[in-house]
Image (cartoon, grey):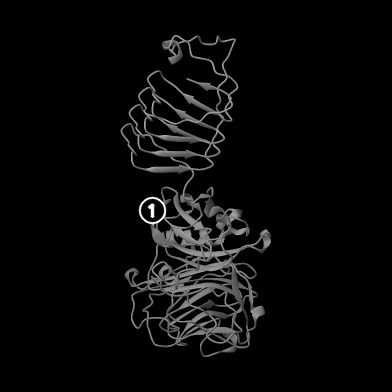
Amino acid sequence: MAFPTGWGRKQPIIIDYTKVNGTANLTNYPFLVTLDYLNSEIVDGGANSALNGGGDIRFSSDAAGTNQLPCEVVSFVTSATPASRICEIHVKVPSVSYMANTTIYVWYKKAGEVQPLATDPYGRNAVWSAQKVVYHLNDDPSVTAPQIIDSSGNVDGTTTGSMVLGDLQTGQINQALHLDGIDDGVNIPNPLPVSYTTRRISFWIKPDVLKRTVFLDKNGTQELRIGLWDATGSLRVYSGGSSTRWISSSGVISAGIWQKIDVDYDSARGGYFKVLVNGVLITPASNNALAMVSSTGELAIGYETASYSWSYYTGLIDNLVVDMNSYTDGWYITEYNNQSAPATFATAGTSVAASGSVLAISPINHTVTSDGSALSQLHGITIHKSSHNLTNDNISLNLGLSLNILTALHLLASDILTPIQLHALLTMNAAHGLSNDNIGLYDPLSYSPHPARRHQAQKARRVLSSATRTRKIQPSNNRTLRI
């Protein structure tokens, strides 16, 4: 059956608006979901857990599950051992507010489910429909080519050198590729279009050492090249030839720590790049107007495409994204907040049964005369407002603590109420009639007629027992019946 039918549990995830930077909402934001946002029951492998592998994981922007969201489950491992649990999921959220918290819902606990196909409207490719290529760089580099999968579905990459499974190491987001600085890298056949006016490239790096090196190179003609200028940690961006470049001061990049690099070109800015490192806009030491060029050449990760020995990068690289859009600084800062400190970016709400656990009926003239309402393991149901009628409804209460029916004009003349293991049944107000109801009550402790009402026995001129000489009647599991 189609989502959300059959899903057993759901949990809200609340994005903290104070972590969303800028002066406008973010549209179609690829939100990274980590273990930080999931209650333990989702990943503990227990009775309420999601499936190992995340086949039953779904997302919606509303509590009812009406608006399903595309998601990519990169890695999802459930375990009774917390240290063994893994979660990397990307969800396309249509709008993330910068003024108020944004809530989405994760759904789980449905046996036999698998993730939608990559090409499904709610599958992997739909998350990255605005991107040209997306490499999470958490694939085994030693298997048959192409080893590096593009989550946008456009073009996969092939590793170079003699990379082994051990080169897949702990990354900033989940896992990342470690390049040896000798011959390791990733080659990607022409992932970029022939012409464009905007382009964005983002990735994470953790260099082992600082040296002159290349993180990313397009076509070997410096059509686009990003790397280190020297051992001082000066970042450089080439485009259109060596005479036109963006170059930072020293100390922008450090060895041994993770850093996020965002390079953004927009012809509307007069051909100038903007570069952010860890969400901070870098003021360059040199910034020439760069006329972007394009070609059909390949994209190389971790080296210059002519394979110069000096160009090979030594260190870890993670989560490379290339697309044809220019973004605001607020977008890049928000993305950095989400990926660098996920524990503070959002919080997990309370997990509940997907079908809900509370029924609230409140408007004065609200009628549910033909509805059926089944409430299980409910502590209480309150029906209020004097003109609210439930004349054709059936309400079954299991394991309830109390049922309160209030106001003189509330009628249940045709209802069937089945209280099970109920501590007390209170019927209040003189005008409340139960003339056609069936209420089974057994084994009371006592019955005392109310002095303000006339009992039918009095009408029949029968003698009632006094308050000190109580008559036994039989309500079940009930301590007192008061009418």
Q: Is residue 413 above or below residue 193?
A: above
Pointer 1 local density, CA inside 10 Å: few below 14, some 14–19, many at least 20: few
**Would residue 236 appear left or right of 364 to someone viewing this image?**
right
Q: Position of residue 244 (x, y in %)?
A: 42, 80
Q: Which amino acid type is shown beneath numbered disc 1?
A: Thr
Query: Which quadrant would the N terminus be assigned to in this image?
Result: bottom left
Identity of the residue drawn at 48% across and 82% down: 156
Pick the residue in front: 187 or 209: 187
Tell me the residue that label 1 is attached to.
23
Q: Position of residue 288 (x, y in %)?
A: 41, 75
Q: Position of residue 86 (x, y in %)?
A: 61, 64
Identity of the residue drawn at 43% across and 65% down: 70
* Number of numbered discs overlaid on the protein picture: 1
Pick the residue in front: 238 or 205: 205
Dividing the picture into quadrants, the one containing residue 25 is bottom left
Dividing the picture into quadrants, the one containing residue 479 is top right
Residue lying at the far left of the rendered structure:
365
Dividing the picture into quadrants, the one containing residue 2 is bottom left
Q: Is residue 15 above or below residue 431?
A: below
Q: Position of residue 363 (x, y in %)?
A: 34, 34
Identity of the residue drawn at 32% across and 36% down: 366
SS under mark 1: loop
